[in-house]
């Protein structure tokens, strides 16, 4: 049971490279393809209003990743031209068992929710090993290197989970890197991997400058 509804055995799937939905986050989506407009219309008629965000496997768009994350539609608005803006609130990660054939133009999948009970908790996960000073300094160097900016006041005020999970979703990381972050079992593991990815990107940049 999650937030007043039972998690279903099968859900609609939205394969989207580079888009991951971390625990206790929200994901805004702009829907314009006819098959996904139909998906949203159908999902809104269900009690759970769940969409499974899942990435195609890198280099093989016909295959889907083993792990995705389901979000509940909590807001939507329709444009004059029929496009939709929706917001998904993360409910739980899942393992994809198999794709389910059907008459819908979009994909559906049989899913397994076991192993992700922590995603259903209302309180954010903490990371006692997070050292804010070095982490934020590394992030600042990464953002500067990539000519990006952030709201530092909001970042500093965020709890551990909001900070790490938001960065995992928003930073311009490769789809396979975002998938690895999604699959981390704990927040500490995700933060450690994120730090490693930032450090690797910084060192790679240093190497490129050296050899030019």
Image (cartoon, rainbow, N blue to C red):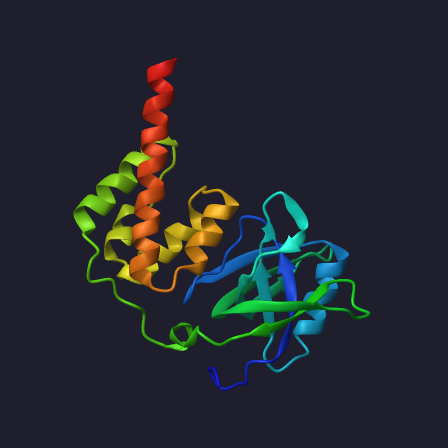
Quick check: can you spot residue 143?
Answer: no
Residue sitting nearer the eye, 88 or 131: 131
Q: Quadrant of the C terminus?
A: top left
Task: Please tell me whether residue 205 is drawn above or below residue 61 in the rendered image.
Answer: above
Task: Place residue 101 in its image quadrant.
Answer: bottom right
Tell me the residue at 34%/60% (across/down): 162
Q: How many marks?
A: 0
Q: Is residue 139 left or right of residue 129?
A: right
Task: Place residue 107 in its image quadrant.
Answer: bottom right
Task: Please tell me whether residue 44 is drawn above or below residue 195 in the rendered image.
Answer: below
Quick check: can you spot residue 36?
Answer: yes
Q: Is residue 71 left or right of residue 141?
A: right
Q: Is residue 212 left or right of residue 139?
A: right
Q: Is residue 180 left or right of residue 140?
A: right
**Position of residue 210 measured from the top left corner of the image (x, y, whole percent):** 33, 16
Taking the view exactly as shown, the residue that stands out farthest to the top is 212
**Position of residue 138 measured from the top left corner of the image (x, y, whole percent):** 26, 40
Tell me the residue at 20%/51% (across/down): 132
**Position of residue 72 measured from the top left corner of the image (x, y, whole percent):** 54, 71
Residue sitting nearer the eye, 1 or 89: 1
**Position of residue 8 measured from the top left corner of the image (x, y, whole percent):** 60, 80
Residue sitting nearer the eye, 47 or 125: 125
Task: Place residue 184 in its image quadrant.
Answer: bottom left
Tell me the residue at 71%/60% (across/down): 36
Tell me the residue at 66%/54% (across/down): 63
């Amino acid at each position: 049971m999650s937030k007043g509804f039972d998690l279903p055995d099968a859900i609609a799937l939205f394969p989207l490279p580079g888009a991951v939905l971390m625990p206790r986050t929200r994901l805004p989506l702009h829907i314009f393809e006819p098959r996904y407009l139909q998906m949203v219309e159908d999902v809104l008629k269900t009690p759970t209003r769940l969409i499974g965000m899942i990435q195609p496997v890198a280099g093989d768009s016909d295959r889907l990743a083993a792990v995705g994350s389901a979000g509940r539609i909590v807001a939507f608005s329709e444009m004059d031209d029929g496009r939709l803006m929706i917001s998904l609130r993360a409910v739980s990660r899942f393992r994809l068992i198999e794709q389910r054939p059907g008459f819908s133009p979009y994909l559906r999948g049989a899913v397994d929710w076991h192993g992700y009970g922590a995603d259903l908790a209302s309180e954010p996960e903490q990371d006692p090993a997070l050292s804010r000073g070095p982490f934020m300094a590394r992030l600042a160097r990464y953002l500067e290197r990539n000519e990006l900016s952030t709201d530092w006041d909001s970042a500093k005020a965020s709890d551990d989970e909001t900070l790490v999970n938001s960065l995992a979703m928003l930073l311009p990381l490769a789809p396979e890197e975002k998938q690895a972050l999604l699959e981390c079992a704990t927040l500490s593991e995700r933060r450690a991997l994120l730090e490693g990815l930032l450090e690797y990107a910084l060192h790679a940049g240093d190497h490129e400058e050296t050899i030019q």
